[in-house]
Amino acid sequence: MTDTGTDSVVGTDPATETDPAIAIDPAAGTDADPAPRPLTVGAYAALAEDRLPPATWHYIQGGAGTESTVRANRAAYRRLRLRPRVLADVSRCDLSTTVLGDAVGAPLGIAPMAYHQLACDEGEVATVRAAGAPGLRIPTVVSIFASRTFEDLAAQATGPLWLQLYWLHRRDVLRTVVRRAEAAGFRALVLTVDTPRLGRRLRELRHGFHLPPGIVARNLDGEVTGFLHDRQDGSSALARHADAFIDPSLSWSDLDRLREQTRLPLLLKGVLTAEDAARAAGLGIDGIVVSNHGGRQLDGAVATLDALPEVVAAVDGRCPVFLDGGIRHGTDVLKALALGARAVFVGRPVLWGLAAGGEAGARGVLTLLRDELEDAMALAGRPSLAALGPELLARGPAAAPNESYEDPDLRKGP
Ligand SMILES: Cc1cc2nc3c(=O)[nH]c(=O)nc-3n(C[C@H](O)[C@H](O)[C@H](O)COP(=O)(O)O)c2cc1C
Ligand SMILES: CCCCC(=O)C(=O)O
């Protein structure tokens, strides 16, 4: 991937007619429609934007307030340059590793996102099938607001499933979803701690965002799903739903009660400081996800790549540290791993893939990131994940954002 890389496309590739991972559109690559094969994650964003209703696109794409944290997440990657080593025998690059004890094909995972059926009819079923593709077998963090049932997902998944939780007022409902996830074979719980209320997402407000009929939080009963389908101009149904059902009193003392209910490992998602990371590690938490919710919560929050080193230092090996936010290229993954992330989670690009081509589209996005990471490891002279460390990185000068889809998050304003 180069900074000048635009979404220029190759011509008709014979492979597009046979490989569903590439022919994300049934007509793609045929004489009738010599459709482009997406060469960048950003190209999937372009396809998604063309296919999704504007309100849905803006819900997915948007951040809070001025979206400065969305931009900061990307800018942090542009400030770091790579220091390649040579003569390192890169004839074989090994991307496989373990996360929470499970073998995975690459140090990648899918960040929890609500309502994948907004992007394609199969919703999260398509997502977990893509994550389980040979060569990937990466974890999917299933949102408590998933639009397909845990049981349907477990039946289709070949990679690990983790369940993301919001701290609902209704603890009885939380207990039930945890029990169901355990019974379905989920491997971990991820408690999101950056959302005592929803960030002020101007795109949602502008579009009066609400869920279309037929898309529901399939794993929750109707007692905790109010407001989601009600349109009100200038207001977000999701924000009203969160105000009503997410308990903002969540504090450190609640973690023990959650852990008493389950033998599954418990991770915290949304930690951005050494202070909180040290406290979590001291309490014996099983993993930390450095995240600012893709810039959708506190506008102005620090970029996740910038927060990562202090969190890794504070945790000091007591639990694995993961990161999400702004991962769009294999080199982004490499930079986060070099700063100590055990693996990284991908958010919006997965929904772009789903919108562009369902399961095959999501698989295309994930495979692209995996392949780009392998390229980057080979070219940086680091054939093994174990060999990655901060000596791989140099500071700036920051490369300017690319005007093309290279940086899809910058492509269109609210
Ligand atoms: C459409 C959408 C829905 C999301 N829903 C959830 C959710 O239900 N729970 C959660 O913890 N995070 C949620 N997130 C945040 C993601 O887990 C993740 O932190 C973020 O998307 C990562 O940044 P990226 O999109 O730049 O990769 C959502 C993000 C998006 C874009
Ligand atoms: C109430 C939360 C909705 C899903 C979410 O976390 C998001 O849109 O970022």
Image (tube, rainbow, N blue to C red):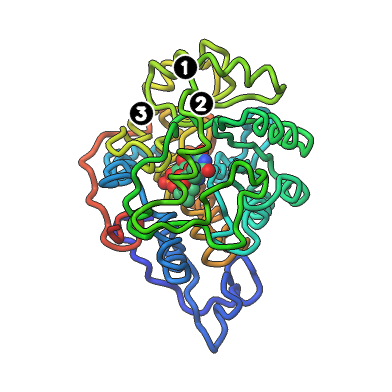
Gap between marks 1 and 3 measured at Cα? 13 Å
Which residue corresponds to mark 3?
A: 307
Residue at point 45% right, 58% down? 231
How far across and down, in percent of the image, does residue 354 sit?
Answer: 56, 61
- Tell me the quadrant of the picture where the N terminus can be found: bottom left
Is 160 above or below relative to 268?
A: below
SS for tag 2?
strand
Residue situated in front as seen by the camera: 336 or 189: 189
Which residue corresponds to mark 1?
A: 315
How far across and down, in percent of the image, does residue 64 sit?
Answer: 33, 44
Mark 1 vs mark 2: in front: 2
Q: Examine the rendering and report whether any part of residue 271 can be seen.
A: yes
Q: Is mark 3 within 8 Å of ligand 1?
A: no
Residue at point 50% right, 51% down? 369
- Tell me the quadrant of the picture where the C terminus can be found: bottom left
SS for tag 1?
helix
Q: Is the residue marked by circle 2 packed among few (<14), some (14-19), or many (20+) residues within 10 Å?
A: many
How far across and down, in percent of the image, does residue 242 sit?
Answer: 48, 40
Q: Earlier in the sequence, mark 1 or mark 3?
A: 3
SS for tag 3?
helix
Residue contact between numbered discs 1 and 2, judged by CB atoms under 8 Å: yes
Q: Is the residue marked by circle 1 packed among few (<14), some (14-19), or many (20+) residues within 10 Å?
A: many
Gap between marks 1 and 2 measured at Cα? 9 Å
Residue situated in front as seen by the camera: 140 or 336: 140
Gap between marks 3 and 2 measured at Cα? 12 Å
Q: Earlier in the sequence, mark 3 or mark 2?
A: 2
Which residue corresponds to mark 2?
A: 288
Residue at point 75% right, 36% down? 180
How far across and down, in percent of the image, does residue 328 sit?
Answer: 42, 50
Tell me the amino acid under the disc marked 1.
Val
Tell me the amino acid under the disc marked 3.
Ala
